[in-house]
Image (tube, rainbow, N blue to C red):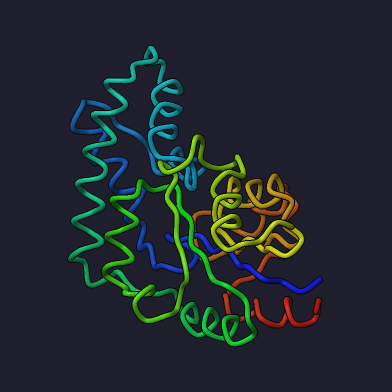
């Protein structure tokens, strides 16, 4: 069965991150008097961000507080929007645009998903102009569905919008544990992890993606060999 839809993550997979997400988390927490270490943030990459913030607060022994988590998330959004609008570091990952265009030439639709909120995703896509340039066909953010990763709802919504019923026609590509588990939970025919983001190869291996690659340029051959 041929692949009809490829779902790519954004930061760390198709968009150069420059560690901006972890730095924004740290800054947002510090505003409310909490210091968090980068090594504690990285395992939460890819999650819906308010959920990641709540997990971090609970880890620090802070009683569940939706208002506090919401306040921290708002500060996080402010920092990330500023970064994605103005930072010269914001660019496509090496090979990302070429790979997406190669797949489109083979008749594969390209979709993007993210643990960010829609306002941040909109900012990234506006900066890179991937929809306008025809590099990507669709995108979705974690706050547009009931639950974000590792639940499969974002992928399922993208499938529905692309007119695809069978997850065996879909592949998922991402750089975190929850990217991998999202693809598995959605029943994707292939789940590919990349080492360009938050997780190293050894950190990704326990989650059993079908493939782990070091550069997106390795992806087309995996798909074509399968076809």
Residue 123 place in picture, x, y as percent: 27, 60
Q: Residue 174: where, in percent of width, then height?
A: 57, 59
Quadrant (top left/top right/bottom left/bottom right) for the N terminus? bottom right
Percent position of residue 173, x then y: 60, 63
Look at 40% across and 41% down and name the residue there: 143
Residue at the farthest top position = 63
Residue drawn 57% across and 43% down? Answer: 153
How far across and down, in percent of the image, does residue 175 sit? 55, 58
Looking at the image, which is closer to me, 212 or 173? 173
Q: Is residue 79 left or right of residue 143?
A: left
Q: What residue is at 51 percent from the left and 36 percent from the top?
A: 147
Q: Is residue 218 left or right of residue 140?
A: right
Q: Quadrant of residue 58?
A: top left
Instruction: Judge whether 101 appears above or below 16 on screen.
Output: below
Q: Quadrant of the C terminus?
A: bottom right
Q: Residue at x 42, y 29 (%)?
A: 56
Q: Is residue 199 above or below residue 65?
A: below
Image height of 115 relative to 35, above or below: below
Give the number of marks. Answer: 0
Q: Nearer the viewer, residue 46 or 106?
A: 106
Q: Quadrant of residue 134?
A: bottom left
Q: Is residue 14 left or right of residue 108?
A: left
């Amino acid at each position: 069965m041929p692949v009809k839809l490829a779902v790519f993550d954004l930061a760390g997979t198709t968009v150069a991150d420059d560690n901006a997400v972890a730095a924004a988390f740290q800054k947002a927490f510090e505003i409310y008097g909490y210091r968090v270490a980068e090594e504690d943030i990285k395992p939460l990459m890819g999650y819906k961000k308010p959920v990641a913030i709540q997990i971090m607060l609970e880890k620090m022994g802070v009683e569940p507080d939706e208002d506090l988590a919401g306040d921290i998330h708002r500060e996080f959004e402010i920092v990330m929007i500023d970064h994605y609008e103005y930072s010269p570091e914001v660019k496509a990952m090496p090979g990302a645009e070429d790979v997406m265009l190669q797949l489109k030439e083979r008749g594969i639709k390209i979709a993007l998903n993210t643990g960010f909120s829609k306002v941040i995703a909109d900012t990234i896509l506006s900066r890179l102009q991937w929809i306008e340039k025809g590099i990507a066909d669709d995108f979705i953010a974690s706050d547009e569905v009931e639950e974000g990763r590792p639940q499969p709802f974002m992928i399922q919504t993208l499938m529905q919008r692309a007119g695809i019923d069978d997850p065996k026609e879909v592949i998922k590509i991402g750089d975190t544990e929850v990217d991998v588990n999202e693809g598995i939970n959605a029943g994707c025919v292939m789940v590919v992890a990349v080492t360009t983001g938050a997780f190293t190869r050894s950190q990704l291996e326990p989650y059993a993606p079908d493939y782990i690659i070091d550069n997106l340029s390795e992806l087309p051959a995996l798909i074509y060999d399968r076809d």
